[in-house]
Amino acid sequence: MSPTVLGRGLGLLRASHPEPAAAVTAVSGLLAWGVGHPPAGVAAVTVTVAASQLAVGWTNDALDADRDAAVGRTDKPVVTGAVGRRGTAVAAVVAALATPALALTLNPVAAFWVTLALVSALLYDWPLKSTPLSVLPYAVSFGALPAFIVLGLPGAPAPPAWLVGAGALLGAGAHFANVLPDLADDARTGVRGLPHRLGAAGSRVAAAVLLLAATATLVLGPPGPPSAVGLAAVATAVVVPPLSWYAGRSATRAGARPVAAFRAVILVALIDVVLLVTSGRVV
């Protein structure tokens, strides 16, 4: 493989938003195993979610290339020329088309729900990012994701309402946390989503409340009393956001991009899924 091809491949990988994409894919695979998918089902869920995450990340960078260039986002491969805007857009289309095709290896109902999650996420990239409804695609997509995983089981059992609700709350919290590092750059380029209207302080509070609500829903939603592990997860959801804000301020003072708040969401999501898997009370 030539250096140029390798460089473009690495640029395309970085344009996919690899950290959140890998986190969502890994959590989905873990949840698939926890609800009882056989190895082939876990693999199908994992590759389907990976394809959807690639589609969303590549679409975002292709659409936002001009905005990213305007604010000097040298961490964006499309801006630096490591990968072309057209190539990124083509890759996004291929990944988007692959998502429902891969999900059909489970069943058509599951394919519908993951397609809903994908379409909702793409609607965030355009046109909802700059509107007061910017949180809606996150809530819908993250709520549809556990529905897809449960419905992908043999017989397509109905997903518990508390599981879908917790996913929606987690997704909404992720939106507020994810936007925090970009509030100033977004303001310069005219993006006015719900977090921008609430401001940094309001968005931090919203993210913390929604993450805590998601965790509490997972602990209190299943039948039976909450476990000690579940109560510990709730305590973690209380403590992690303030720690992430402190880490974010430290990163800002050091001249780095403050991504600690979004990583806190990933941590809470991982803890929540481990809680579900170990409790054995999903479906």
Image: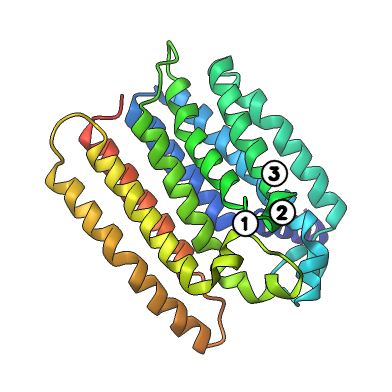
87 vs 242: above or below: above
Answer yes or no: is residue 74 visible.
no
Q: Quadrant of residue 156?
A: top left
Front residue of this view, candidates 154 and 167 = 167
Residue located beneath label 2 in the image: 60
- Mark 3 closeness class: few <14, some 14–19, many ≥20 residues within 10 Å: some
Front residue of this view, candidates 90 and 165 = 165
- Mark 2 closeness class: few <14, some 14–19, many ≥20 residues within 10 Å: many
Q: Provide the secondary structure element on which disc 2 rests.
A: helix
User: How far is mark 2 from mark 1, CA to CA?
Assistant: 9 Å
Q: Which numbered disc flags the more N-terminal residue, 3 or 1?
A: 1
Identify the mark at residue 17; answer none if there is no mark.
Answer: 1
Q: Position of residue 101 (x, y in %)?
A: 67, 24
Q: Provide the secondary structure element on which disc 3 rests.
A: helix
Q: Residue at x 79, y 55 (%)?
A: 63
User: For the residue marked with disc 1, what is the amino acid?
Assistant: His
User: For the residue marked with disc 2, what is the amino acid?
Assistant: Asn
Residue located beneath label 3 in the image: 123
User: How far is mark 3 from mark 1, CA to CA?
Assistant: 17 Å
User: For the residue marked with disc 3, what is the amino acid?
Assistant: Leu
Q: Position of residue 124 (x, y in %)?
A: 67, 48
Identify the mark at residue 39; answer none if there is no mark.
Answer: none
